[in-house]
Image (cartoon, rainbow, N blue to C red):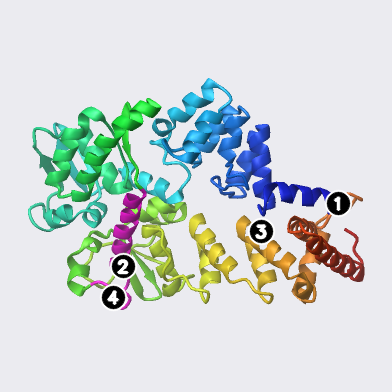
Amino acid sequence: LGADTAISQHHGTLGKDTIALFESCRRGDLSKIRHLVEEREIELNIRDRWDGTPLYYACLCGHKEVVEYLLDNGARCVANTFDGERCLYASLNVGIRNLLRDHKVVTSNTMRRDGYDQFLRRCLDDRQHCDITFRVGGEEVRAHRCILAARSEFFHDAFRTKWRGHNVVPVTHHLVDASVFRIMLEYLYTGRLEMQARQSDSLIELAERCRLTSLVEQLHDLLVSSSSRRKAWNEFKTLLLEPSQYAQEVQRDLSRLAEQTLPAGDCKVSADERSTGDAGYADVCFNVHGCYFFCHKVLFCNRSEYFRALIEDPFTEALSTGTSRDVPVISLNHVTPEVFKCVVQHVYGNTTTALEPENVWEVACVADVYLLPELRRQCGQLIGESLDEAGACSALKVARLLRLHRLEEQCIDFMARHLAQVVQRPEFREIVAQDASEVKLRQETDSISVIDDIRYHIAANARSCAEVALANQKLALIDALLSDMGLDA
């Protein structure tokens, strides 16, 4: 237990991959960090027992490329916060300090690692599925009725009244140019915006006319607070508005839109709102065993490459819905309406209120087929929260099959903590035998994957003398199991 226990005591209760991330940031091993972040899905803002983060250690050790990679992939370094100041003053050289100071401007256009943020950005940039054009100062700005109406009462009302039936809408206010109008669209689509300070008056005027009261208030607060932050960080050539509450508002509004797409029996909005609301801008319908989901191409195509290929396939059969809506209908035969409801909720609002322990396994498999990795991970999280001795082995198999690395880690940790019960189960023996069979031309240094991982977790949790004694008892159980199975690892 010596080496593993020493590592564990140094890093607290962190997992094996997380410890590897901290060590790689100290060494500057960028390839290893890429693997851990992109393949193993390790959280970048985790802390060790000294409140250090991976970004802090990369700054401290002077690895500029690692710092840049961490920032671009979601590591937090916010001005005038403990983490931001700590990283700034711990930086080994001026190059890293400048990188930290310029961080917000560098990453504001690339929405970092959050899958939902990236999806919203793709919707904003989508031109193929636009159904409304605004003519602003001689330029054309294209957009999607469904998103604007879902996000703004002003646009919702205008599309139903004065702009009804119009495909091109002129915007003639003398203070509003195309660049400012696009900034407002960025806010409506993503919950964030970036602007030059000189554009603030025009944007506030436009937001007031569009009855975006919350945006107006936040813009005033931003203009007041940016001066002090500029003094501290000297970085605000560009002003950014990225409060988390706006991202939550986008999710809330698009989740409401998702409710309007559901079959009549599942819909939580009134019949009048369903017929005249934002779902009225539906341009694709999914027929799931006779249940019709009236949806929007811009959201499904930008959320999943599977649905993009399905919707844009010229050979996809377009049928009639039997209703007054003239939209193409695509039949989905290998999913139930209840499971597809989870898919719709995830696509629109990144929520899964319909996800339950009873359907989570089926939803996880469907998410894998539909190329929805975030939904697949959400399923893995729910499975991990309800692990028990009877289901841990099945959960481990699913985690490996669907490449849910975090769930796999949770299953191994659960098995290590309940080893006396787990080793008695025949399905655990099956996993051990399967892992042993995958080791080709076994050498003395080869090990069985599940056994090696469980041994690590046992050692990582052993600190006191009593815990070390218990760990040795568990290791003896493993040795006895392997001996009984005729294996040596």
Amino acid at the residue labelled 2: Glu
What residue did someone put label 4 on?
264
Horizontal arrangement in the rendering, residue 239 relative to residue 398 (left or right)? left
C-alpha separation, residue under disc 3 versus residue under disc 4: 41 Å
> On the image, numbered disc 1 is attached to which residue?
446
Q: Is residue 481 left or right of residue 230?
A: right
Question: Where is the N terminus found, in terms of image quarters?
Answer: bottom right
What kind of secondary structure does the magenta stretch mostly adopt? Answer: helix
Residue 406 lies, with reference to residue 169, above or below; the image says below
- Name the residue type under label 3: Glu
- The 10 Å Cα crowd at callout 2, few under 14, some 14 to 19, many 20 or more, is many
Image quarter hosting the C terminus: bottom right
Q: Answer above or below: position of 298 versus 68.
A: below
Chain-order first, disc 1 or disc 4: 4
- Three-letter code for the amino acid on which mark 4 is drawn: Ala
How many neighbours does mark 1 have within 10 angstroms: few (below 14), some (14-19), or many (20 or more)?
some
| Residue in the image at 78% along x and 63% along y | 467
Q: CA distance from mark 1 to mark 4?
A: 58 Å
The reply to whether discs 1 and 4 touch (Cβ–Cβ < 8 Å) is no
Amino acid of disc 1? Asp
Q: Quadrant of residue 288?
A: bottom left
Q: How far from the left and from the top, in percent, is residue 191?
A: 31, 47
Question: Nearer the viewer's eye, disc 2 or disc 4?
Answer: 2
Mark 2 vs mark 3: in front: 3
Mark earlier in primary sequence (2, 1)? 2
Query: Which span of residues is magenta-colored?
Result: 244-269
